[in-house]
Amino acid sequence: MFVDPWLPRAAAVAPRRVAVHTPAGSWTYAELLTTARDGAGWLAQRGVGAGHRVAIALPPGLGFVQALHAVMWLGAVAVPIDPRLTAAERERLGRGAAAVVEQPLWEGPSPGGSAGLAGSAARLDLEAAAVIVHTSGTTAAPRPVSLTYGNFLWSALGSAVALGLDPDERWLCAMPVSHVGGLSILLRSVIYATTAVVHERFEPEAVLRALQDEDITLVSVVATTLGRLLDAGLRRPPRLRLALAGGGPVPAALLARAREAGVAVSETYGLTESCSQATTVPAALAGDPGQHGAGSPLFCTHVSIGGDGEIFLRGATIAPGAVGDDGWLATGDLGRLDAGGSLHVTGRKADTIISGGENVAPAEVEAVLEAHPDVLEAAVVARADPRWGEAVTAVVVPRNGDALDPEVLRAHCAAVLAPYKVPRRVLLADGPLPRTRSGKLLRREL
């Protein structure tokens, strides 16, 4: 199935609406259309055509947005690469690309009238690859995932059904656009013909100012960035409808803090292979934090739980190359569906600790630890043990550097967890726990 290209359509229906706003400047949809067409001409002069891969190693901002839409204009395939990676890492992820964009196209050699070479924007084949995104690499090396135009279109429609859609939406992205969470904000906004507000990196004070002063209606966060915003003084942002929280479970204590601060949080679950959101707490239920887990499936996505608790996904948002012969994506995550159909994620299969023959989900223990008022963040890992096989071990970062008694934390866990889930050791850490650039915990580095 073919559909009209998204950017020309948005420029036709809302030419003067701001398409992308950054601290360095803004473009309307009419301006983005022009600069994307010129960028496409520049790429076409260098031999880029339909189906070719183009690596984009630019930070979040106007340059990245121009390059992304220039690539799509030609029917080529964008390969976003985090420019903060080493040269060797960037080379490996961009291997096989017909071109590599490492500086904004408008700062490169002048197109010299090359815009005409680009012609009209290509119609979009919903089954064709649009972007190749690499996984965040929490349990292994990053893997390439090919996402289609149909994946992004159905994801955008499903997200709008779950979260609602304000015609004057301004969705703040302060996360990497080399990962699917940030990238999806840029593409959804063009599909909706709304505004994406893009920050190069997450800086609490800058994001806080934007939420208070720039009419932000939606913001995507992970638990750590939500906590940092609340610590920085976020309270009752005037236009914010929802904070969409993904990348892992959000501690109940943090949800309570957000509610007290007048911030409605919609938890979501997804992964690269599901084109970002797979389940989301609907906007109508976001005022009841923590009761609906990671929410119900997007209307075009289906969730099933295997016999061992593994989460399986199927539907129009799932990368075609990631599914098995039965059409289902095996996520490697563990969870359950409640009576209302909401998904509650309990951890990763690969992270499961087997202690004395009993299975322990680290995420469950971490949630209990992080509910303690003196704990900033926690990670639970397995350590070899001659008696138990694997011993549940917690690494805890105290809040505000306060001294913590490990035995007090063990007693805190024992009050709500079965004995075999209580950490046998609690280790205190001075600094933040290792995480990916998208905020996911890196247990393998502990």
Image (tube, rainbow, N blue to C red):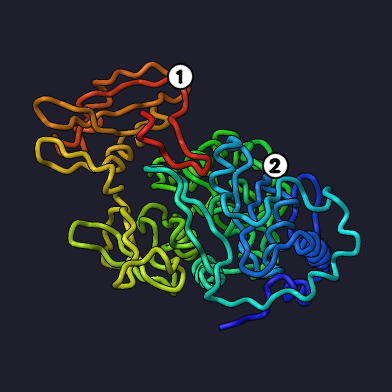
Q: Is residue 239 visible?
A: no
Q: What residue is rendered at 60% in x and 44% in y? A: 82
Q: Is residue 386 above or below residue 136?
A: above
Q: Quick one: which residue is furthest to the bottom in this view?
A: 1
Residue that numbered label 1 is attached to: 401
Q: Is residue 360 above or below residue 39?
A: above
Q: What residue is rendered at 43% in x and 69% in y? A: 320
Q: What residue is rendered at 75% in x and 53% in y? A: 21
Asked whether the residues under the numbered discs 1 and 2 touch, taking CB atoms below 8 Å apart as contact, a structural biologist would say: no
Sequence-wise first label, 1 or 2: 2
Quarter of image, res 116: bottom right
Give the quarter of the figure containing the C terminus: top left
Q: What residue is rendered at 33% in x and 60% in y? A: 343
Q: Is residue 328 above or below residue 228?
A: below
Give the quarter of the figure containing the N terminus: bottom right
Q: Say whether residue 37 is left or right of residue 100.
A: right
Q: Say whether residue 64 is left or right of residue 380.
A: right
Q: Which secondary structure lies at badge 1? A: helix
x then y, percent, for residue 409: 28, 26
Q: Looking at the picture, which amino acid does disc 1 mark?
A: Gly
Q: Quick one: which residue is furthest to the top in this view?
A: 403
x then y, percent, for residue 17: 79, 66
Q: Looking at the picture, which amino acid does disc 2 mark?
A: Arg
Residue in front for this viewpoint, 223 or 350: 350
Q: Which secondary structure lies at badge 2? A: helix
Residue that numbered label 2 is attached to: 209
Residue in front for this viewpoint, 280 or 5: 5
